[in-house]
Amino acid sequence: MAEKTGISWTDSTFNPWIGCTKVGPGCDHCYAEALMDTRWHKVQWGAGQQRQRTSAANWKQPLLWDREHEAFALMHGRRRRVFCASLADVFDNEAPAQWRGELWALVKATPHLDWLLLTKRIGNVRGMAPAEGLPANVWLGATVVNQEEFDRDAHKLLAVDASVRFLSVEPMLGPIRGAPSIGAFDWLIVGGESGKAARPIEREWIDSLHDQCAWFGVPFFFKQWGGPTASAGGCVLAGAEVKEWPVAA
Ligand code: SF4
């Protein structure tokens, strides 16, 4: 939806459609629902509700970013990263398959962009990816918020062929012991929950995950502590910002 984004690990966001259904504890305080349903009444959240496709003008934005890739690379020394989708889930089985097909065509038509697809439905990816596999410019991520979700989903992500495979542990709701499979990932993002009803994160959970990533050489991106107020949510870990990126990025 926007050229600039407040999400610190991406440059831009693109939402092909809006709307979703909650699928786990990580969705309890879904900000997209709070914004798009509760506040702006743009869509109704949940099972059986129609997803809303974004405008044709919005769908043209990535083409523009792709055309501007040389200027972007000159300024930043790397390719533009596009997070798709912050207000939906690309692998939502209630989103029309045709829209997803058009999204794959757009991803292929923008080879100078890196598309970050983060899902809470990693088990759906194999059946919803293009028949020939994910385009080379897709970074595929799965959200896991606790040990149960790691044990359930980490191997599903590793079963999919993607240029970059990453885990997003946000909001982190419990400790995770990921060894040895954690070493197979290209990147790990961690963050605490923010907002009035934020569930607290514990320092030792983060330290443990950080140690596990360091041991296996997995780049670690600490996004935020989270908490009920913005001032409580800084991103300094052990006195420094830890913001690492996949090696190939
Ligand atoms: S998957 Fe994401 S967008 Fe969908 S309900 Fe959960 S938190 Fe919200």
Image: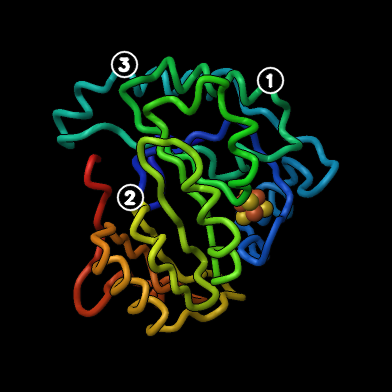
- Which is nearer the N-term, disc 3 or disc 1? 3
Q: Secondary structure at mark 2?
A: loop
Label for residue 78?
Answer: none
Q: Residue furthest front?
A: 180
Q: Residue furthest right?
A: 48
Residue tagged 3:
67
Give neighbour class at mark 2: few <14, some 14-19, many 20+ (Cα, 10 Å).
many
Residue 249 lies, in percent from the top left, at 25, 40
Pointers 3 and 1 in contact (C-beta within 8 Å): no
- Residue plotted at (24% across, 65% down): 242
- Residue plotted at (23% across, 40% down): 248
Q: What amino acid is at disc 1?
A: Gln
Give neighbour class at mark 3: few <14, some 14-19, many 20+ (Cα, 10 Å).
some
Could you tell me how far apart the alpha carbons at marks 1 and 2 are, in whole angstroms? 30 Å
Q: As rendered, which of 34 and 103 lies closer to the eye?
A: 103
Does residue 35 appear anywhere in the picture? no
Does residue 167 appear anywhere in the picture? yes
Q: As rendered, which of 99 and 208 lies closer to the eye?
A: 208
Pointers 3 and 2 in contact (C-beta within 8 Å): no
Q: Secondary structure at mark 1?
A: helix
Between disc 3 and disc 1, the foreground one is 1
Q: As rendered, which of 184 and 97 lies closer to the eye?
A: 184
- Residue plotted at (45% across, 41% down): 140
Residue tagged 1:
98
Q: Secondary structure at mark 3?
A: helix
